[in-house]
Amino acid sequence: MPLHEDGVAATMTAMKSQITFRQVALIVLAVLVSMAVANFDKLLPHRWQTYTAPDGSFSVELPGKPTVETTPVPVEGGSTTPMTMVSVNPTSSTSYMCSYAEDESILRKSADEALESARDGSLRKTQGTLISQKRTTVQGYPALDMQMRARGNSLVDSRLILVGDRLYMVMAVAMVPEDGEAKTVQRMFESFKIIKQ
């Protein structure tokens, strides 16, 4: 009899171990699924699309299907000029965009003055603080790379490119700085191509 009782006890202990292991496995699985659902947009790879301007002037790769809108922006002298913005929001906390506008007053300035004026305007509009900047060129055109902290503690990476009287701004915004994706920013910046002036 004692042997039988020991066998039953051992079987019950083994069953408890199996049930406990199964419960732990289910809990871990539930946690993983809930994390995946909560971060669904961050875990999926971006679906890159190349946008080419209708006038054939430039192209850029964006991490998703872009939307295009045009809005008037003020320029020197009190008038306005249309600014076109091509943008995509691949996650709830990140935005990537390329905007451009033509302004004849740019032609009266040196490249440095035009880029610095655009930088200062961008900082004013976003209530931003400059973190870093670097002069560069894109296909021989004068450009300025900068990173800034904007209102709400957003992290903004942007590249300003001066092509004749047209100013391009390629920009990435991470509303939560930790959500910034340096590789995505770099790919978008490097994909920008002037096709014709």
Image (cartoon, grey):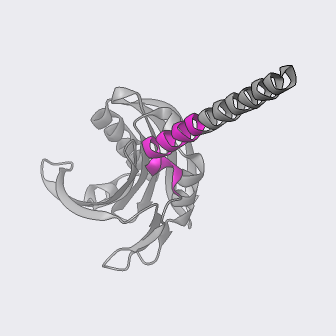
Foreground residue among 172 and 110: 172
Between 27 and 19, the one nearer to me in the picture: 19
Task: Estimate the x, y position of residue 127 in percent, counting from the top left.
Answer: 32, 29
Q: Is residue 68 left or right of residue 162?
A: left
Residue at the extreme left of the image, as rendered: 79
Asked whether, in this view, residue 124 is left or right of residue 176, the answer is left
In the picture shown, does residue 76 fall above or below 45?
Answer: above
- Which quadrant would the N terminus be assigned to in this image? top right
Q: Residue at x 16, y 48 (%)?
A: 77
Residue 53 on the magenta span: no
Magenta residues span 26-44
Q: Is residue 50 visible?
A: yes
Q: Position of residue 73 (x, y in %)?
A: 19, 51
> Would you identify the image quadrant in which residue 175 lies?
top left
Question: Which residue is rendered at x = 45% and y = 49% of the image?
Answer: 40
Q: Residue at x 50, y 39 (%)?
A: 35
Query: Which residue is the extreme one toward the top?
Result: 2
Q: Dividing the image into 4 quarters, which one contains the C terminus?
A: bottom left
The percent position of residue 153, horizontal first and vertical second, equals: 40, 27
Question: In this picture, is 74 found above or below 98?
Answer: above
Residue 158 seen from this side = no
137 to the left or right of 125: right
Q: Quadrant of residue 53?
A: bottom left
Which residue sits at x=27%, y=55%?
105
Relative to residue 79, is residue 165 drawn left or right?
Answer: right
Q: Magenta includes 43?
A: yes
Q: x, y (%) of residue 167?
A: 36, 58
